[in-house]
Amino acid sequence: MPPLAIVPLLVATAAISIGRFVANRPEERLRQTGRLIFNPDFFQGAYKHQRYFEGWYYKFASNYVAGTMNSTTMDTASNEDIDASFSIAVVPGIFLGNSTTSTESHAFIFVTINGEKQHYFRFELDEFSYADAAKGEEYYIQVGDNHFSHKGVSLNLSPRTGDDATLTLNGKLTFANPSPWPVSLFHLGAMGPVGWMPGLECTHGVLSFDHEIYGSLTFMDKHGRGEMDTTTTVVTTISMDNGRGYTEKDFGRSFPSLWVWIQTNSFARHPGTSLFVSIARIPTPLGLEFPGFTAALWHDSTLIPFATWSGAKFEALTISKEEVRIVIKNSKRYGSHRVEITVDRIDVPEVLLYAPKNFSRMEPLVWEALRGTVHLRLLNVNEEVVLDEIGTNAGLEVHGDVDWLVDNMCGKKSANRFVCL
């Protein structure tokens, strides 16, 4: 999308929503909303009572060299060799159903290890607490006995009646040198100026592209071994020292109807480098939809954005069962970089994760991989290769009729020439 093409859309949707926005928010709520806009890590839903979700995505990848693991198998099962590299996603959050009395409203934490199995832990709403930005508190959220902040996480999870989980997970991790997406008046983090558009169904934020991890995790899980024996329990302790962490979040009414998401910050030769890509169909209060994307490369402590709002353009987008391939060229304002991304999907395990459905409940809806491989190339304005690297432990989601995104690349007959990728 040309940078100026989005301006009328922003103005029109703002004009429709601004009166209702102000009328529904007393003075203190307006002040609180202003504080939260520039602090996307804090809980944004204090004044929400229905049709709302908010989730924080914490990803931990162990270090190939420094990571150690001890595995103990209880009862009669024998030890099995397990890959010493782990990619773990832990997602705390809250879901509010389609009415203030909905029995589906709850807090949650879900966990997936290596993208092979999901564990969903459900909590009562009063087990969810959070920092108050207005009081100057440091960011944190707490769900049950589980604590999350910029400094680290403390986990104490075990299945309760009604949980879709077999995993027990305990441990403490500390973080060092976080790298958040900068937030300013004109660029609300990953959303850029689009973040000011009222009525967005989902807002996305990158809270830390990359940070170092120290500590360990111990998990106990039950594994079935056929009809005669389903009681095998494996206890595993993972050292996460010198691992890499990544944190993002989403909040709003619902997820988009279709999207592609890619993330990795496990680059062996360039620790600290991180890649993030999100492409989606974005609805507006006017009933219009447009393809939008926000992507970025964090490299050498420098942010290189590739986004709708930065004037970047897709030069290639192919999505198949074997791979996802993306080529994006940035505008002159952001250095005219070209990024080439190829994600290998062959034999990569995927797990079905919970997500909000029809405002009414959380259901397993979204397939996600956590052990993908990304070939990344970054070229400068002179077509010189700045970075040529393989990223491992990559997260990948391909959801919905993503051919619509391919059909809406600029230059294609099927695309709107004013609003395209």
Image (tube, helix red, strand yellow):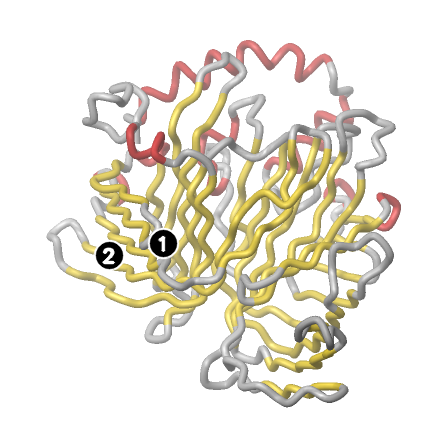
Label 1 amino acid?
Leu
Residues 327 and 321: in front is: 321
Q: Is residue 418 left or right of residue 86?
A: left
In this view, 101 is above or below 275? above
Q: Position of residue 206 (x, y in %)?
A: 52, 49
Q: Is residue 171 visible?
A: no
Quarter of the image containing the N terminus?
top left
Where disc 1 sits, the SS reads: strand
Which is more N-terminal, label 2 or label 1? 1
Question: Circle 2 is placed at which residue position?
Answer: 378
Residue lying at the far left of the rendered structure: 382
Relative depth, front residue between 98 and 173: 98
Could you tell me residue 322's position as x and y percent? 32, 54
Q: CA distance from mark 1 to mark 2?
A: 9 Å
Report helix, strand or loop for mark 2: strand
Locate the C terminus by quadrant. Answer: top left
Residue 330: x, y in percent?
A: 25, 42
- Say the numbered circle drawn on residue 297: 1
Asked if one can make out residue 289 in the rendered structure from this viewpoint, the answer is yes
